[in-house]
Structure formats: C-alpha cells, structure tokens
Amino acid sequence: MADKNPSDLRAERTSVRLDDVDRKILSLLQSDASLSLDQIAERVGASKTPVWNRIRKLRDAGVILRQVAILDPDALGLEACFFVLVRTSEHDKDWATRFLQALRDRPEVIEAHRLAGDIDYILKVQVRNARAYDRFYQSLIGEVKIHNVTALLSMEEIKATSALPIP
Amino acid sequence: MADKNPSDLRAERTSVRLDDVDRKILSLLQSDASLSLDQIAERVGASKTPVWNRIRKLRDAGVILRQVAILDPDALGLEACFFVLVRTSEHDKDWATRFLQALRDRPEVIEAHRLAGDIDYILKVQVRNARAYDRFYQSLIGEVKIHNVTALLSMEEIKATSALPIP
DNA sequence: ACTGAAATGTTCCTGAC
DNA sequence: GTCAGGAACATTTCAGT
C-alpha cells in the first residue's frame, strides 16, 4: 500500500473537477472494484479507452486511493463493535503523541477521530466480545492516562458502507 | 463475480476456521486487493493454485464480502465528518422502520448503528461542510421525529482503516 | 475528445499430473 | 501440492470520426 505523504503536492486541497462520466465510474468502483474495464465502459456508455484514461487520471489525482477487500466481521468471529467516547485532562503534545501511537498500534481500533467540543476523541473498536473489549480498554488506560471513557455498544449495524456520496 | 445468494447456507454464524496462510491472504487483500495472484502467492510462500483455491473458499464462505475502491473524501470536497448521537422518545416499530429507511436513503450517512444504553443510535455522516450537515439534519428531523441529537464534529482523522483485526 | 480495432503482455482459472 | 495452457483481461497504440 502506498503511504500517504502529507507533504506531497497532490490536488487534495482543491477538490477535483468531475463530470458525470467520472462520477458514474467512481460510483461503480466504490460498490464493486472487481468490475472489468469492459463492464464499466458498457455501464457508463463509453468505450474502453476513455474510461481507462479517466480511471488513471482519478488514481493519479488521488481521488481513488486504493482497492481493498471487505471482510465480514461476523464470519471472523468479531461480533462486538464499540464506539468509545474519550475525554482527557492531559492536553500536552507528548501525551497526544503517545495516545495516537497507542491507537495506531492496536488493530482493534478501526477508526479514531479527534473531535471539537467536550468529548476529545471517538474510536470505533471491533472485537470478539465484551471480554475482549475490556482487555483492550484495560490495556489502553494502562498505557496512557485517560480522564473519562464512555463505551457505546452496537446492537445492530443498520448501515455500513465504504461508498462516499459523490458531489 | 459470483452473486451473493442471501438464502444460501453459508457458515456465517459459526466463525470460519482459518490457518496462518488464510490469515496472511486476508491480511494482504484487506490492505491491497489489486495484488495479482502471483504476488499474493509469493508473499504467503505458496504457489498460485492453492492460493487461488483458498481465496475462492474464503469468498464462498462469506469471509470476503466484496472488493471496492476507496476514495479520498478531501479530494471530493467532503471535508466535514460528523458523528451524530441520536436519542428518541418513540420506540414503536413503525417509527423505527421509517427512521431506518431515512438513513438508508441518504448517501451522506456512511454508517449507522443501533446502540445499547441511553443513546439509541449513532451515525457517521460525511458532508461538504457544516452548512451541508445542517441541511442533512433539518431534512432528517423533518422526516422523522427525534427527541435529542448531539453532533460531534471530527477535527482530525487519526486512523481510518477498512482492515479488520484477523483473530 | 471519443470510437473501434488491433497488438501485446499479463493474469486468471482449469485440468492434468 | 506442481505445472502447463487456453481464455479472459488490461494496457497501449493507431487510424478514423
């Protein structure tokens, strides 16, 4: 996988200009990246060459980041999903660095965001069961000091898509 | 690609047995599904045919759900990400059906979970900016009655992966 | 800038061993 | 598990529109 270099000069600040054909291509690839060039060309109503050129351009422009396989958490026995709301008292840079590293090092942490407002961080954590979550939690608070933690347990995944709304 | 038949007898309730080679294959495909069979075979230390048979088995068993392209939200101009905590007073089935449909219909809703505890639902919403979030919010509460909503604005995506921890 | 065709190399997938 | 081969596909190029 290509690393994201934050200092490189890709056109990420100014959002890329897309026409309807680009949008259709992106929309198709977001839902099924195993489609062949022939199938994509047919569905967007163009021929292979221009479609191929557009996909290349979208990749180079950084619109398409990568292609991945989506696995079923249940089939892997990962039946518990928690959203974790974190409040911290520490706000120095050293603490933040260690906290971020702790999150990046733990594969159970699927997603982590720093927030505006009185909750400082939100995590999405996918584990086998509640006991596995507790192990994760104990290990995390053992590694970095955290003021307050609220865990929200998901009972049902109503919707989960990797597809962004294409503007 | 083979169609998924929802009524078939896949072993999704009992988690599938995996050996180290399966785990390696899944781990590779989770981070880069554009790898060729040759490359995967080389990296897991096996030859093409057995690797191909394993991938087929993992697909048929429902462990590998699908293959998608991951897009960059910033490159698409989707610079605002909100986590939305929803409390409702209504708990009848009709309300739930309409609420779920409203979420499924809105492409800004990337993720939606029903929760245990005093917060009933959590949503992840990806939009262009705060104004677009407000439009989404107004439209949602206009469609279904919601008791209480808290929006958490993401300032920074610390980690975001589609890769599950493989047990 | 797109189409259609064609050439070439690569990869997939099957079947034999 | 290995190997080999035909089918399918991706990736260029090129002439015509």
Image (cartoon, coloured by chain):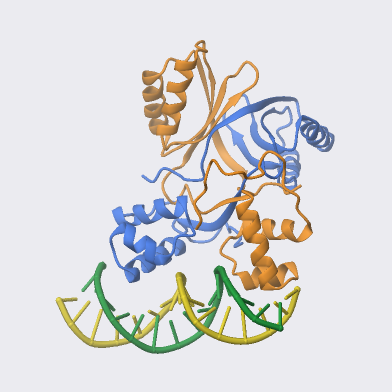
Chain colours: A blue, B orange, C green, D yellow
A46 w.r.t. A162: above or below: below
Residue A68, position as x, y percentages in the image: 57, 56
Residue at 66% x, 64% y: name it. B53
> Which residue is at the front of the view, A29 or B76?
A29
Residue at 48% x, 19% y: name it. B96
Q: Quadrant of residue B10?
A: top right
- How many callouts does the rendering have? 0
> What quarter of the picture does the C terminus of chain A occupy?
top left
Residue at 72% x, 40% y: name it. B14
Residue B57, position as x, y percentages in the image: 65, 57
Residue A49, position as x, y percentages in the image: 34, 71
Residue B40, position as x, y percentages in the image: 66, 68
Q: Is residue B121 left or right of residue B23?
A: left
B86 w.r.t. A44: above or below: above
> Which residue is at the front of the view, A114 or A52?
A52
> Which residue is at the front of the view, A105 or A77?
A77
> What quarter of the picture does the N terminus of chain A occupy?
bottom right
A100 w.r.t. B46: above or below: above
Q: Is residue B125 left or right of residue A27?
A: right
Q: Is residue A117 visible?
A: no
